[in-house]
């Protein structure tokens, strides 16, 4: 099966991560979302090095709805430029990938 993705998204808090995760799964833009917290992030923003504690979403979805997912995350997210990175799933258990398809199939 082709066209499955893992999407990584960082958020400012576990609460924000839960809100985004529930929306993505509820709207069938994601089959499953794992929340990993805390995540310690070091990054450059507006010329200065920042260190923050964040939450990380690990989203399982399909490539053909990535743009809808990105737009929805941008609507829900508090960051001016949220991290949304999609990685292809090159292989996996066929029954799990089939399950992803079943969870997202109702997206118009």
Image: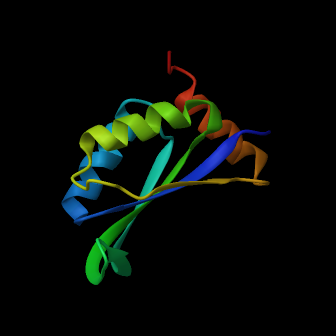
The structure residue drawn at horizontal position 26% and vertical position 80%, both measured from the top left corner, is 52
State left or right for residue 30 relative to residue 37: right
The structure residue drawn at horizontal position 51% and vertical position 41%, both measured from the top left corner, is 31
Residue 65: horizontal and vertical position, in percent?
A: 55, 31
Q: Is residue 99 visible?
A: yes
Residue 28, compared with residue 34, is above or below; it is: above
Judge by depth and name the residue closer to the eye, 18 or 7. Answer: 7
The structure residue drawn at horizontal position 26% and vertical position 49%, both measured from the top left corner, is 77
Residue 54: horizontal and vertical position, in percent?
A: 29, 72
Judge by depth and name the residue closer to the eye, 96 or 80. Answer: 80
Q: Report which quarter residue 38 is drawn in.
A: bottom left
Residue 99: horizontal and vertical position, in percent?
A: 63, 38
Label count reads 0
Residue 57: horizontal and vertical position, in percent?
A: 41, 59
* Residue found at the very far front of the displayed protein: 47
State left or right for residue 58 relative to residue 39: right
Judge by depth and name the residue closer to the eye, 61 or 42. Answer: 42
The structure residue drawn at horizontal position 58% and vertical position 24%, both measured from the top left corner, is 105
Q: Is residue 38 visible?
A: no
């Amino acid at each position: 099966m082709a066209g499955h993705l893992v999407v990584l998204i960082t958020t400012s808090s576990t609460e924000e991560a839960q809100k985004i995760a529930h929306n993505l799964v509820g709207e069938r833009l994601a089959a499953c979302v794992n929340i990993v917290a805390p995540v310690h992030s070091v990054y450059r923003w507006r010329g200065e090095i920042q260190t923050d504690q964040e939450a990380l979403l690990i989203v399982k979805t399909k490539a053909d709805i990535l743009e809808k997912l990105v737009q929805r995350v941008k609507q829900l997210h508090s960051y001016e430029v949220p991290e949304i990175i999609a990685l292809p799933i090159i292989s996996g258990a066929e029954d799990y990938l089939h399950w992803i398809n079943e969870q997202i199939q109702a997206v118009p």
